[in-house]
C-alpha cells in the first residue's frame, strides 16, 4: 500500500466504516470491499482546485471545459475509491448518514490493518497488479486558496465545509491498465481483503431489531469474527439520577 504525498500516518489510528446491513453481509460473503468510481460521488466539489463565490463573474476564457478539465474527468472515471471515517469513538451522525438511520453495522479498523489485509488487485488474473493508494483527506478553504497539486493528489483534498467527514481515503488507479488496452469497469470494483486481519471490531447499530442482529451475527460467525461483535453505546439505557 502506497501512502499518498509521503503523509505521516498514525498506523494505529482508529478508522470506521458504516454500512447498511445488506452491505455488511455482502462483505462477509465475498471478502471484498467496494471501491466506487470517483465520478459516482454526489459532491460536485470533488477534485476542485478553487471555488468562485456565488455570483462572481466568470472569466470567459474559463467558461468552457478546458483540456485539463476533460483529463481530470477521465481520471475520475479511472480512479476507484473507498472511504473511512477517522475517529476515536463511534459517531451518531455517521450512523444516521451511512447505516440506514442507525439500522446498520460499523466496522472498526486501522491503517496498519488495512495495509496488512489488502490483497493484490488485478482486473483479470493475467494482468499486472494495481497499486492501492491511501492517505488522509486534507481540507482547504478553496475560496481563499487555489490548490497546486498533481491531478492524482486532488483526490485527497476537499473544500473546507466537508471537514466534518474526517476522511481516510483508499484508491486504486486504473489509468495504467487502460493505457495498456485493458477494459476498465465504468463504475466500481471489488477489492479483496483478508477480513480476519482487516476487522478489529464490529458494532451493531443503535436501531437494529432482533431479527437483523441475528443476521449480522450469523454473517460474522461464518467468517470466524463472531467474537469481535460489539453493541453500540447508543443502544444503552440513559440514566438521569
Image: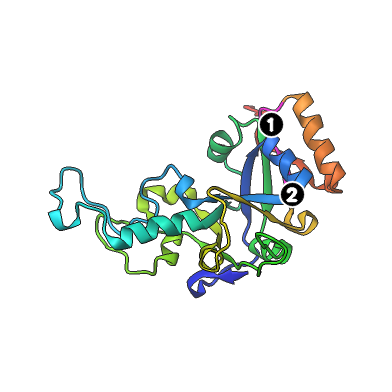
Using the rendered view, name the quadrant where residue 104 is placed.
top right
Secondary structure of the residue carrying numbered label 2: strand
Using the rendered view, name the quadrant where residue 152 is placed.
bottom left
Closer to us: 191 or 137: 191
What residue did someone put label 1 on? Answer: 235
* Magenta segment boundaries in residue numbering: 202-208
Q: Quadrant of the C terminus?
A: top right
What whole-number distance in Å separates the C-alpha atoms at marks 2 and 1? 16 Å
Closer to us: 133 or 112: 133
Q: Position of residue 145 (x, y in %)?
A: 26, 62
207 inside magenta stretch = yes
114 inside magenta stretch = no
Residue 201: image tag: 2
Q: Earlier in the sequence, mark 2 or mark 1?
A: 2
Q: Position of residue 184 (x, y in %)?
A: 56, 56
The nearer-to-camera label among 2 and 1 is: 2
Which residue is drawn at the image coordinates 45% and 49% (left, top)? 39
Q: Residue furthest bottom?
A: 6
Q: Position of residue 136 (x, y in %)?
A: 51, 61
Instruction: Locate residue 19 relative to residue 161 in the image: left or right.
Output: right
Amino acid at each position: 500500500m502506497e501512502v499518498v504525498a509521503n503523509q505521516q500516518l498514525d498506523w494505529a489510528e482508529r478508522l470506521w466504516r458504516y454500512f447498511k446491513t445488506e452491505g455488511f453481509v455482502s462483505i462477509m460473503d465475498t471478502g471484498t470491499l467496494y471501491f466506487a468510481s470517483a465520478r459516482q460521488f454526489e459532491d460536485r466539489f470533488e477534485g476542485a482546485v478553487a471555488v468562485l463565490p456565488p455570483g462572481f463573474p466568470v472569466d470567459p476564457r474559463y467558461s468552457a471545459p478546458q483540456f485539463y478539465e476533460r483529463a481530470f474527468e477521465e481520471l475520475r472515471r479511472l480512479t476507484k475509491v473507498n472511504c473511512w471515517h477517522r475517529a476515536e469513538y463511534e459517531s451518531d451522525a455517521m450512523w444516521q448518514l451511512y447505516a440506514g438511520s442507525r439500522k446498520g453495522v460499523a466496522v472498526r479498523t486501522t491503517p496498519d490493518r488495512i495495509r496488512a489485509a489488502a490483497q493484490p488487485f488485478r482486473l483479470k488474473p493475467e494482468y499486472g497488479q494495481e497499486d492501492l493508494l491511501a492517505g488522509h483527506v486534507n481540507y482547504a478553504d478553496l475560496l481563499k486558496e487555489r490548490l497546486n497539486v498533481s491531478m492524482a493528489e486532488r483526490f485527497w483534498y476537499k473544500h473546507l465545509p466537508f471537514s466534518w467527514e474526517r476522511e481516510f481515503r483508499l484508491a486504486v488507479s486504473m489509468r495504467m491498465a487502460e493505457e495498456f488496452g485493458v477494459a476498465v469497469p465504468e463504475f466500481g470494483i471489488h477489492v479483496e481483503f483478508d477480513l480476519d486481519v482487516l476487522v478489529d471490531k464490529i458494532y451493531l447499530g443503535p436501531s437494529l431489531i432482533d431479527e437483523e442482529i441475528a443476521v449480522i451475527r450469523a454473517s460474522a460467525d461464518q467468517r470466524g469474527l463472531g467474537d469481535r461483535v460489539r453493541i453500540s453505546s447508543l443502544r444503552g439505557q440513559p440514566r438521569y439520577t
